[in-house]
Image: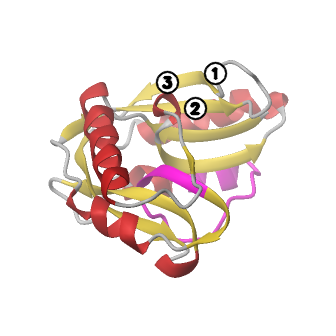
Amino acid sequence: MRLFIAVTPPEHVLDAAEEAVREALGEHPDPGLRWTRREDRHITLLFLGETAPGRLPALEQAFTDELARHGPERVALRGAGTFPGDDSAATVLWAGVQGEHTASPLAGPAAGLRRAARTGGVRVERRPFVPHLTLARSRRPAHLSALRTALGALATPFWEAGEVHLVESRPRDRGRRYRTAATWALG
């Protein structure tokens, strides 16, 4: 099973992101990006990758225990960025996540989930956590500075991120790409 753990924004936030993308594309041509589907948009806290089903019960218990230590956070989508950071040769365009009361939104739960996964024997990427919502991808590096700049005005209302989902990715499934396998409340 290919798994990740994520927060899903509410519908009104996804509406605002969709509107910002429409406006940006009205001003700038699409350089051939593959735009994520609205129903697939999420903020990844931890990518687990391929995980043996037999490991799930212990991991789910560890994640349950860890997430109980963290309370809900008020967050919003703000601005945009790219991966890698060079807008002239980027492969991912994303909306940023801002905390209402913290400089590093969702960093506590993300770090705790990483620790729990490592303790459970899962290899976890060591790159810094950058909370974001992926908007589009490009197979080859593309010049995304105009779109990133146009999306810089993206500013949704704050909402309470209080639920975290364990999600199974099924890239070859012709139906829904993602299936929620478990849900936890923060706190």
Kind of element beneath mark 3: strand
Residue named by callout 2: 166
Relative side of 74 to 112, left or right: left
The mark that comes first in sequence, 3 or 2, is 2
Q: Disc 1 residue type?
A: Arg
Residue named by callout 1: 176
Residue furthest top in the image: 175
Where is the N terminus found, in terms of image quarters? top right
Tag of residue 183: 3
Tell me, yes or no, whether the two marked residues, 3 and 2, touch with CB atoms within 8 Å.
yes
Relative side of 75 to 85, left or right: left
Relative side of 7 to 122, left or right: left
Relative side of 159 to 60, left or right: left
Viewer can see residue 46: yes
Q: Nearer the viewer, residue 159 or 103?
A: 159
Q: Residues within 10 Å of mark 3 (few under 14, many from 20)?
A: some
- What is the x, y in percent for residue 78? 25, 57
Question: Toward which corner of the image does residue 180 lie, by quadrant?
Answer: top right
Q: Is residue 143 above or below residue 119?
A: below
> Magenta stretch?
114-137
Rounded to the nearest whole Å, what is the CA distance between mark 3 and mark 1? 18 Å
The mark that comes first in sequence, 2 or 1, is 2
